[in-house]
Amino acid sequence: MPEQRPADDGATVDIPLVDPPLRSTTLADGRTATWQEFGVPDGRPVLYLHGGGSTSIEGGIFHREAVQHGVRLIATNRPGARGSTLAPERPAVAYADDAAQLLDALGIDAVSVFGESNGGLMTMALAAGLPDRVRSVAPINPTLPWFDPLARTVSSRAAAVAYRLLRHAPRLLAAMDHAATPRGPVDDARPPARGSRFVDPDLVGPPPGTEPDVAALHRRMQRERAGKDAMLAELRLAGRPWGFDHFAIPVPLDLFCGVQDVQAPFALVLADRNPDARFHHFSYGHHGFSHPDARRRIVETLLARADA
């Protein structure tokens, strides 16, 4: 496993984390869309798209990097999360229209976009749906297109079980996600106890070396889930065809994956097949992106690609 640097950069750890107010706008069809803004108010606009079942507070994990790089980090809530109106039965690419309306409301012409897990899938959906407005995208541990035979071929048995449940029993998977949501105080920065692969911080928690306040925010993200209905909508969204060609993303694409994440093998395929794509890895598993070294590389790569 590659070694990561400790969180000892005074230029970033001295930046306090924030919990900005929830904002909202009304979309053309009457639905409500909500978001939070991290980083600096007058900075370079970047969208952050949370993982399935998560919410906009996930974007706060990248607040320090946003401040350091002069970024206005707009963390959206997809339908069903934190006051955004539930909108089931739409393909993933339809969210590009929601994002376009939000950008119009904010007076923003162009952005870079990054996000984690289902948010990684949605970064590609925005790139496909808004190629004239999206400058670069960085999916983190992006969801697999399980409808693609190649994704099934390169993936592990563990991934196969999860994605079959996603396709054939999404309600069961949503209920399992709700039951597995951690309980207890949200400011507890201690790592979860070892003893099971399901609570090993190498795989599912903020990795060793993560600042205590970021680790606490990460666990708050895991506790404050969007609810069963929103999770069910996210599972269905991921499990059906996405409405765009995932091998033809029309903007610069940088895929980041934890070395132990089950979605990494197909992310390598995405990096190989897309016209302007690269693959990057970070230590640990699905949630290793919380580590300061991973966060720094993701944000710096995303911005540099937009400027290239």
Image (cartoon, grey):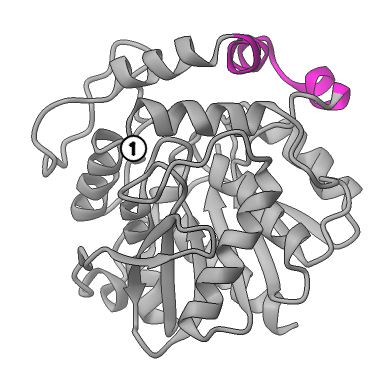
Q: Which quarter shows the N terminus? A: top right
Q: Which quarter shows the C terminus? A: bottom right
Observer-nearest of 183 and 254: 183
Observer-nearest of 253 and 226: 226
Q: Residue 70's x, y, as percent?
A: 42, 85
Q: Residue 264's x, y, as percent?
A: 67, 35
Asked which quadrant contains residue 231, the reply is top left
Specify the farthest residue to the bottom.
Answer: 42
Question: How many circles with numbers are drawn on the protein?
Answer: 1
Q: Residue 283's x, y, as percent?
A: 51, 42
Magenta residues (range): 149-168
Measuring 73% from the left and 67% from the top, which residue is drawn there?
Answer: 130
As for residue 285 lying within the magenta part, the answer is: no
Q: Is residue 274 visible?
A: yes
Measuring 35% from the left and 22% from the top, which residue is drawn there?
Answer: 200
In the rendered image of this protein, does residue 67 appear above or below residue 21?
below
Q: Mainly helix, strand or loop, the magenta region?
A: helix
Measuring 35% from the left and 79% from the top, which residue is drawn there?
Answer: 67
Q: Secondary structure at mark 1?
A: loop
In the rendered image of this protein, does residue 277 appear above or below residue 18?
above
Residue, disc 1: 226
